[in-house]
């Protein structure tokens, strides 16, 4: 009967309006002992409008067998968007589980004429607390696309800036703060292959390789020496992520996540 309770919640989520749920199943360490080793979850969203305001809302819930349906929701969210004097403005609130005493808030504003985006992250409960603020300015120069993205963490008082330059299949991204710097050079080798090494001021190195498989399918491998090898394989509605921690030349484990969109 516990399994029926889980299916009941998925059914409620799936039949509401015409939204299309997404079902994902994670397999930890590459193996499982029966259904207890799986971590299935279902996500559903829909939208409506009220005057000039567009409204979206959704839920992500665990799909494990249980007799307590109230324990299944992982997060519940809602988003409102509108246009104000040339600015596209949106606010998104997310609650963890069924705890409605506090919410994470994201506020975004973008102006296409100015090529400017603003983003704010905050929390709301007993009061309103700003966590992070950032802005992104885009411009073109000599056929190149350039963006400047200053960021500030109000809670930790840490600030950095991300500078991006892209031209003729080559992109350079520099992330710099007072204490650390990181540079990524991305190069489109041909129509199907892209490589992107990253070097940080701490000496850390990573290399990302993306291979296009056609029809918007791809496989991406990211190697972080002495840390991990990550693979992402996109094939139609399927997305598989494989994380393999590395200690020296030894692979110490395998974490697998498989996801696809399904219709109920």
Image: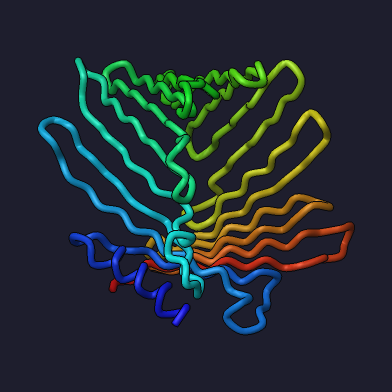
Residue drawn at (28%, 63%) of the image = 20
- Relative image position of residue 116 (x, y in whole percent): 37, 19
Residue sitting at x 81%, y 59%: 246
* Residue 2 in view, yes or no: yes
| Farthest residue, direction left | 51
> Image quarter for residue 244?
bottom right
User: Quick check: 16 left or right of 165?
Assistant: left
Relative to residue 153, is residue 16 depicted above or below? below
- x, y percentage for residue 260? 42, 68
What residue is rendered at 68% in x and 61% in y? 243
Where residue 213 appears, x then y in whole percent? 47, 65
Q: How many marks?
A: 0
**19 with respect to 257 (left or right):** left
Residue 242's x, y, as percent?
63, 64
Quarter holding residue 196? top right
User: Which of the colour schemes (rainbow, by chain, secondary structure, one colour) is used?
Assistant: rainbow
In the foreground, 214 or 240: 240
Compared with 13, 154 (above or below) is above
Task: Please identify the quadrant where the C terminus is shown.
Answer: bottom left
- Residue 230, image quadrant: bottom right
The residue closer to the viewer here, 24 or 4, is 4
Toward the right, the furthest residue is: 248
Residue 213 visible in rendering: no
Front in this rendered view, residue 229 or 20: 20
Q: Residue at point 62% right, 54% down?
A: 209
Relative vertical location of residue 72 with respect to residue 201 in this rendering, above or below? below
């Amino acid at each position: 009967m516990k399994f029926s309770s889980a299916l009941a919640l998925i059914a409620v989520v799936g039949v509401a309006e015409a939204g299309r749920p997404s079902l994902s199943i994670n397999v930890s360490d590459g193996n499982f002992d029966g259904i207890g080793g799986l971590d299935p979850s279902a996500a559903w969203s829909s939208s409506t409008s009220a005057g000039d305001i567009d409204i979206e809302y959704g839920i992500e819930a665990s799909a494990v067998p249980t007799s307590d349906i109230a324990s299944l929701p992982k997060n519940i969210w809602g988003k409102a968007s509108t246009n104000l004097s040339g600015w596209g403005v949106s606010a998104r609130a997310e609650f963890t589980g069924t705890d409605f005493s506090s919410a994470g808030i994201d506020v975004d504003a973008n102006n296409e004429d100015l090529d400017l985006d603003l983003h704010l992250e905050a929390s709301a409960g007993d009061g309103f607390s700003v966590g992070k603020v950032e802005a992104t300015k885009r411009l073109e120069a000599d056929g190149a696309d350039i963006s400047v993205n200053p960021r500030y963490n109000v809670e930790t008082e840490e600030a950095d800036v991300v500078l991006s330059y892209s031209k003729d299949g080559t992109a350079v991204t520099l992330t710099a703060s007072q204490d650390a710097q990181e540079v990524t050079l991305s190069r489109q080798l041909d129509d199907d292959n892209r490589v992107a090494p990253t070097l940080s001021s701490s000496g850390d190195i990573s290399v990302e390789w993306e291979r296009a498989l056609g029809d918007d399918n791809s496989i991406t491998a990211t190697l972080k020496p002495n840390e991990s090898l990550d693979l992402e394989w996109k094939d139609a509605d399927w997305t598989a992520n494989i994380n393999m921690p590395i200690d020296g030349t030894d692979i110490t484990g395998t974490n697998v996540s498989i996801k696809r969109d399904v219709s109920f």
